[in-house]
Structure formats: structure tokens, C-alpha cells
């Protein structure tokens, strides 16, 4: 059953509209977004799809086809940050943040279903926030641009749900276009759509969901973030983005300890890797980005130390079996990796990874090819 029919069954009337917002993978630029640096994600074909109608009585009704349980009913003037409403905190947080920003939202009915795997580092949470934000923007005629919607969605996750994420995931979901990677400056949210057409080059990009999520993740993210902020403080800049790659060695010598040196080296060199990938794609040399991806993984593994045995096994096995390059993507400690391969080699490399996981006694990974898909959009018009 589609979300339109599901909505009708739940709420007894057709929705005013249906919207979709995708998950993402990040090609390069990890833990750089909150350092006001550069990232390069692209949208997956997997989307959160929501059927939504307005209400005038201050009530918010939320339902997910993917979660066991009844409709969550909330009063929008009683929404309070960090009060545990489970999954519903994501769409409720968007309503809260829009109202905090002065937009008049008088209620909504929402029913959604998503094909973005949850907790796999593919941003199912951002898809949920962005689909809600776009639906309300359209229904209430708020006139907000995509970057503004992404910023509000991020704030919903930061301030309402309580997850201190950067802005990359929401920007990727809100602003991606089909066939392109999104070159994003996380300082001013300026962006450029970079053609990333793998098929015409006879290349493929595999996403490998390791299906592990290590509990270590949440605290470690905050610790890396604080370390980066401390590094910036010691270097006398507002964010690590302000350290030029050419000045990296000199900057490292000015830092108080080895841990901060590793974090700073990762962030400044990953910003530089984004530049290098952009230059290679602009030059049409897609194959040459492979080693840069692997270099990024080594930096995340050895300097930022956010990888795990499963992610390392994906990267090592992929590269040993003929891939052009590979790296973990997203927050780390589990989640997904990406692998760039010659298209005819994709099956062989996928099989090698699956076999290596079997031999190591790991849970079988989920492997699928990813083609850059569209960002958030309205899906169709209801008759009413
Ligand atoms: P990621 O964004 O990497 O997938 P997160 O932990 O940030 O992982 O977000 C996952 C959370 O988002 C889930 O635990 C759930 O609360 C919410 N979520 C994602 N998809 C859905 C869905 N289809 N229905 C309900 N909640 C969802
Ligand atoms: Mg998330």
C-alpha cells in the first residue's frame, strides 16, 4: 500500500500532497561539515515518502508505516525539545523549529514510509526531517529556499532531537540533483552540482552497509567535535576550515598534544581531498578519485580513529580484489562504506567482500550499487 492510501485509511481523507526526500552517501569530506569545511555527498534513490495535510486546530498527528505502533498525537504548542517521542521527534522537531523561526504552522497529519535503511549511516533521519520540512514549506506557502530548509532540519535534529550533527545530511537530501554530486561549502552553504555520471565511464559505486552500529559512536562523535574546536582555539581560528592545507605542517607543530594533531590533520587534509576530487571530476578523470577515497579512509582510520574492523575489512578487501578505491562514509563505528569499481568488476568485488565477512564471522553485509539520484521533491498532486 502506498503512503497516499495509507494516509486515507488512517485519517479518513486524501492527503493534500505527497513528498519524497532521499538518503545520501558522502563521496569525500568527512567530519568537515561542522568545521565549516567542504563535503561532497550525493542522494541515493532510497527515499522517505510522506503524505501530508494541514490542520487548523494545533494538532500534529504522525504515523510511520515502518514502525509498529499507533498514530502519535501531539499538540504543537506543547512541543518541547528533548522530550522523548521516539521516531516522531524528527518530524515534530521540524514543526517546532519552523514555529521557533516565526512561521505559522497550525497543525498537520502525516503518514510516511521510507526505503532508506535506518542506522546504516545513510541518513534516514535527515530524509525524515527534510521530507517534513519540504511538505510544510509547500503546504503553508512559507517560501523558504532549499538551504534554509536544510538548516532548519539540522536545527530540529540538533536542538529538538538532541543529536549534534552537522549540516551535510540535510543539505544532501534537500539540494541534490540527479546524476550529480553536491560540492558544498558548509560555511555559507554555497554549492555546485558536479556531474557524477559513473555509468557512461563504465564505472560503478557500491554501497556496503556493514549492518553494524557500535555503541561507541555517539560519545566519540562529540569527543571528535570538541577536539576539533579545541584545535581551532589553539590555532587562533574560528573553525579548522580556516587552516590552509599549505600551512598544515606548521599548524600541527603549534598544537599541544598528539590527539589534537591527529584530528586537525584529518580535517584539513580531508578538506583538501574534497578539492582534489572536484578537480579530478572537473577534468573528467573519474578513475583517479579512487586512491583519494582510500587515502580518506586511512585518515579516518588512523588519525580520526572512527573506523571499525568491519569497515576496514570492506576497504581492504575491495582494494585487494581490484577496486579503484574505497572508504567508510558517514559517522563511522559501523554503518556503510563506498567502493569505486570498474562496472564489469562490481560483482566480483561485491562477492569478495561478502566472502571476507563470512570468513571473519561478521554478519552478512548489504551491498548495492548507487547512482546519484534526485533531491527532495513533491511526488504528485492529489485530485482535491
Ligand atoms: P541514520 O540517519 O544514519 O539512518 P539515525 O540514528 O540518525 O541513523 O536515525 C535513525 C532514526 O530515524 C531511527 O531510529 C528512527 O527514529 C528515525 N527513522 C528513520 N527512518 C524512519 C522511518 N521510516 N520511520 C520512522 N522513523 C524513522
Ligand atoms: Mg542520521
Image (cartoon, rainbow, N blue to C red):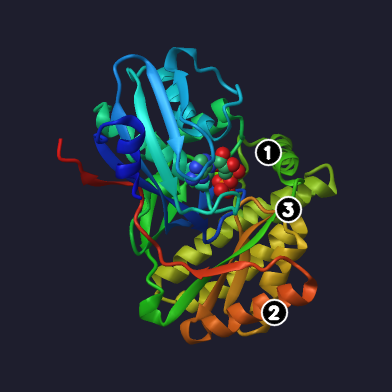
Which numbered mark, 1 or 3, is in the foreground of this view?
3
Q: Residue at x 39, y 49 (%)?
A: 191
Work out how far the residue at label 2 is from the one at label 3, CA to CA, in angstroms.
28 Å
Give residue 304's mark: 3
Work out how far the residue at label 1 is from the one at label 3, CA to CA, in angstroms.
15 Å
* Viewer can see residue 174: yes
- Residue closest to the eye, 250 or 188: 188
Q: Which residue is drawn at 55% across and 26% down?
A: 160
**Which mark is first along the chain, 3 or 2?**
3
Give the residue at mark 1.
232
Q: Pointer 2: residues within 10 angstroms few (<14), some, or many (20+)? A: some
* Viewer can see residue 246: no
List x then y, in percent, for residue 113: 42, 46
List x then y, in percent, for residue 382: 19, 41
Work out how far the residue at label 2 is from the one at label 1, CA to CA, in angstroms.
43 Å
Q: Pointer 3: residues within 10 angstroms few (<14), some, or many (20+)? A: many
Do the residues under discs 2 and 3 have CB atoms within 8 angstroms? Answer: no
Which numbered mark, 2 or 1, is in the foreground of this view?
2
List x then y, in percent, for residue 226: 72, 36
Give residue 355's mark: 2
- Element marked by disc 2: helix
Amino acid at each position: 500500500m502506498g503512503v497516499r492510501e495509507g494516509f486515507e485509511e488512517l485519517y479518513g481523507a486524501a492527503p493534500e500532497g505527497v513528498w519524497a526526500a532521499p538518503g545520501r552517501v558522502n563521496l569525500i569530506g568527512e567530519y568537515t561539515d561542522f568545521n565549516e569545511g567542504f563535503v561532497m555527498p550525493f542522494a541515493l534513490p532510497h527515499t522517505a515518502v510522506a503524505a501530508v495535510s494541514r490542520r487548523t486546530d494545533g494538532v500534529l498527528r504522525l504515523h510511520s508505516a515502518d514502525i509498529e505502533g499507533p498514530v502519535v498525537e501531539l499538540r504543537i504548542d506543547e512541543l518541547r525539545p528533548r522530550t522523548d517521542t521516539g521516531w516522531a521527534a524528527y518530524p515534530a522537531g521540524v514543526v517546532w523549529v519552523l514555529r521557533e523561526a516565526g512561521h505559522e504552522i497550525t497543525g498537520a497529519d502525516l503518514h510516511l514510509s521510507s526505503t532508506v535503511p535506518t542506522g546504516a549511516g545513510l541518513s534516514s533521519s535527515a530524509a525524515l526531517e527534510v521530507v517534513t520540512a519540504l511538505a510544510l514549506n509547500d503546504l503553508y506557502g512559507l517560501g523558504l529556499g532549499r538551504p534554509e530548509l536544510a538548516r532548519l532540519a539540522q536545527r530540529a535534529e540538533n536542538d529538538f532531537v538532541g543529536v549534534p550533527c552537522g549540516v551535510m545530511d540535510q543539505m544532501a537530501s534537500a539540494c541534490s540533483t540527479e546524476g550529480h554530486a553536491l560540492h558544498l561549502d558548509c560555511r555559507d552553504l554555497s554549492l555546485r552540482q558536479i556531474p557524477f555520471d559513473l555509468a557512461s565511464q563504465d564505472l560503478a559505486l557500491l554501497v556496503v552497509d556493514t549492518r553494524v552500529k557500535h555503541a561507541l559512536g555517539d560519545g566519540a562523535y562529540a569527543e571528535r567535535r570538541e577536539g576539533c574546536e579545541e584545535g581551532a582555539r589553539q590555532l587562533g581560528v574560528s573553525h579548522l576550515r580556516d587552516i590552509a592545507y599549505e600551512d598544515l605542517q606548521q599548524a600541527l607543530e603549534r598544537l599541544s598534544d598528539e590527539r589534537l594533531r591527529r584530528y586537525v590533520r584529518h580535517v584539513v587534509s580531508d578538506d583538501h581531498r574534497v578539492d582534489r576530487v572536484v578537480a579530478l571530476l572537473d577534468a573528467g578523470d573519474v578513475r583517479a578519485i579512487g586512491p583519494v577515497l582510500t587515502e580518506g579512509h586511512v585518515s579516518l582510520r588512523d588519525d580520526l580513529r572512527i573506523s571499525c574492523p568491519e569497515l576496514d575489512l570492506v576497504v581492504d578487501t575491495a582494494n585487494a580484489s581490484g577496486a579503484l578505491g574505497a572508504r567508510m562514509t558517514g559517522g563511522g563505528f559501523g554503518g556503510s562504506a563506498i567502493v569505486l569499481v570498474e562496472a564489469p568488476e562490481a560483482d566480483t568485488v561485491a562477492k569478495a567482500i561478502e566472502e571476507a565477512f563470512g570468513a571473519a564471522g561478521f554478519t552478512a553485509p548489504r551491498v548495492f550499487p548507487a547512482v546519484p539520484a534526485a533531491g527532495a521533491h513533491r511526488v504528485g498532486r492529489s485530485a482535491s
